Amino acid sequence: GAGVSQSPRYKVTKRGQDVALRCDPISGHVSLYWYRQALGQGPEFLTYFNYEAQQDKSGLPNDRFSAERPEGSISTLTIQRTEQRDSAMYRCASSLSQGANTEAFFGQGTRLTVV
Amino acid sequence: SQQGEEDPQALSIQEGENATMNCSYKTSINNLQWYRQNSGRGLVHLILIRSNEREKHSGRLRVTLDTSKKSSSLLITASRAADTASYFCATASIVGGSYIPTFGRGTSLIVHP
């Protein structure tokens, strides 16, 4: 597609349920990033892939959060046993390569609300 | 933790005026990117400046980078109401072989028509 696509755009879930957020990066982009953004704050890094390999997951807040990118394209961020504090905008970005000077392009985000 | 910090946190100006936002960071970087976020919309990439560059232009945007002071500025000239948005800087430095853009908290710009 022309840009990074995330789905769903909005997700309301009950506390304790699992959710899966999807990111479809720009075609051919090697690197894929997940961020979380609270209201009034900047995006906070969660995890990062080059192709299908998860290179860095240091930003995942706890073991309820996981991500995968099995074929090096679409990625899924899964949150198990959701809690109200997980409510935020979840953003995905992709870049053409893992080089030092390539731009990262973002999708529209998924607004997650845990009630 | 957030690497870059934008200043000011909020800026209110009249249409036609120039807007200047600053970003300071703490560690050495490979590049710095500026993004715009309109209310309810995604992050739009504006410009990337490399660590060996000092100034870059794109339309009404001018970005400077001073690596000795670990700071960058974004200047929007002849502002328009449509420039109203939050502006973020993101620094990228190598961490374990990866370049991960790290964002500040942003500057909220309001341009009054």
Image (cartoon, rainbow, N blue to C red):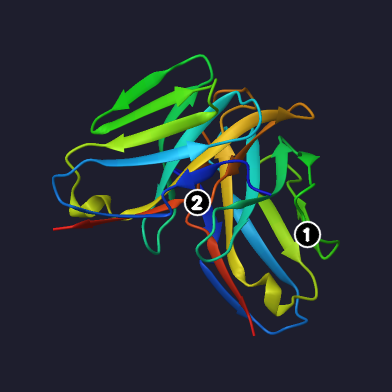
Vertical placement of residue A20 versus A60, above or below: below
Dot 2: within a 10 Å radius of its alpha carbon, few (fewer than 14), some, or many (20 or more) residues?
many
Q: Secondary structure at mark 1?
A: loop
Q: Quadrant of residue A25?
A: top right
Name the residue located 36 percent from the left edge and 56 percent from the top edge: B38
Residue A58 x %, y %: 79, 47
Residue at far top of view: B52
Q: Chain of mark 1?
A: A
Distance between the Cα atoms at labels 2 and 1?
Answer: 21 Å
Residue at far right of view: A63
Dot 1: within a 10 Å radius of its alpha carbon, few (fewer than 14), some, or many (20 or more) residues?
few
Q: Is residue B59 left or right of residue B55?
A: left
- Point out the frontmost of discs 2 and 1: 1
Query: Which three-letter amino acid code belongs to the residue tagged 1?
Result: Pro
Q: Secondary structure at mark 2?
A: loop
- Please tell me which of labels 2 and 1 falls first in the chain: 1
Query: Which mark identifies residue B71?
Result: none
**Residue hosting label 1:** A61
Q: Chain of mark 2?
A: A
| Total residue callouts | 2
**Residue hosting label 2:** A107
Name the residue located 65 percent from the left edge and 50 percent from the top edge: A34
Q: Quadrant of residue B40?
A: bottom left
Name the residue located 13 percent from the left edge and 58 percent from the top edge: B113
Residue B4 x %, y %: 57, 41
Name the residue located 72 percent from the left edge and 39 percent from the top edge: A49
| Labels 2 and 1 within one chain | yes
Query: Which three-letter amino acid code belongs to the residue tagged 2?
Result: Gly
Residue B64 x %, y %: 40, 25
